[in-house]
Image: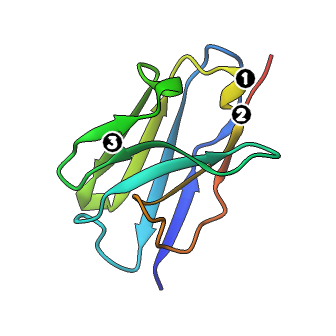
Amino acid sequence: QVQLVESGGGLVQPGGSLRLSCAASGRDFSTNDMGWYRQAPGTQRELVAYITSGGWTSYVDSVKGRFTISRDHAKNTVYLQMNSLKPEDTAVYFCNEFPNGGIAWGQGTQVTVSS
């Protein structure tokens, strides 16, 4: 069974940092482009960043310079390092294939930025 499990979220003050992890199981994802997505209450899920199988990365403007996506092929895991967090980054964060989100969505990990 193909599965994505996100972890690493939590409550952090503005300006703080978190590192999210997405562990994939059930098959090898090293040849897939992968993305981190987020969904805030009352909004649609949006792409935050993606990384290609070769390691090329791209970010939405709102997180450029603050977030870094990376991956470890040996661990079948994708990471999202989030620095200088802002209250508007509060959301549930998910990972999935990019661009089509073709794997069953996991439960995500809640990130709350608040003082």
The residues tagged by marks 3 and 2 sit, at their Cα atoms, a distance apart of 21 Å
**What is the x, y in percent for residue 11?**
73, 32
Residue identified by numbered label 2:
90
Answer above or below: position of 36 versus 4.
above
Q: Which residue is drawn at 43% across and 23% down?
A: 64
Residue identified by numbered label 1:
87
Q: Which of marks 3 and 1 is in front?
A: 1
Q: In which quarter of the image is residue 86?
A: top right
- Mark 2 nearby-residue class (10 Å; few <14, some 14–19, many ≥20): many
- Between 33 and 84, which is closer to the camera in this rendering? 33
- Mark 1 nearby-residue class (10 Å; few <14, some 14–19, many ≥20): some
Quadrant for the C terminus in the image: top right
Residue identified by numbered label 3:
70
The residues tagged by marks 1 and 2 sit, at their Cα atoms, a distance apart of 6 Å
- Mark 3 nearby-residue class (10 Å; few <14, some 14–19, many ≥20): many
Asked if marks 1 and 2 touch (Cβ < 8 Å), the reply is yes
Asked if marks 3 and 1 touch (Cβ < 8 Å), the reply is no
Q: Which residue is drawn at 34% across and 37% down?
A: 58
**What is the x, y in percent for residue 26?**
40, 80
Instruction: Identify the amino acid type marked 2.
Output: Thr
**What is the x, y in percent for residue 61?**
47, 26
- Between 22 and 35, which is closer to the camera in this rendering? 35
Q: Residue furthest left?
A: 54
Q: Is residue 111 visible?
A: no
Q: Please state if 35 lies on the left or on the right of 75 as rendered.
A: right
Q: Which of marks 3 and 2 is nearer the N terminus?
A: 3
Instruction: Identify the amino acid type marked 1.
Output: Pro
The residues tagged by marks 3 and 1 sit, at their Cα atoms, a distance apart of 23 Å
Instruction: Identify the amino acid type marked 3.
Output: Ser
Answer above or below: position of 36 versus 113.
below
In terms of secondary structure, where does tag 1 sit? helix
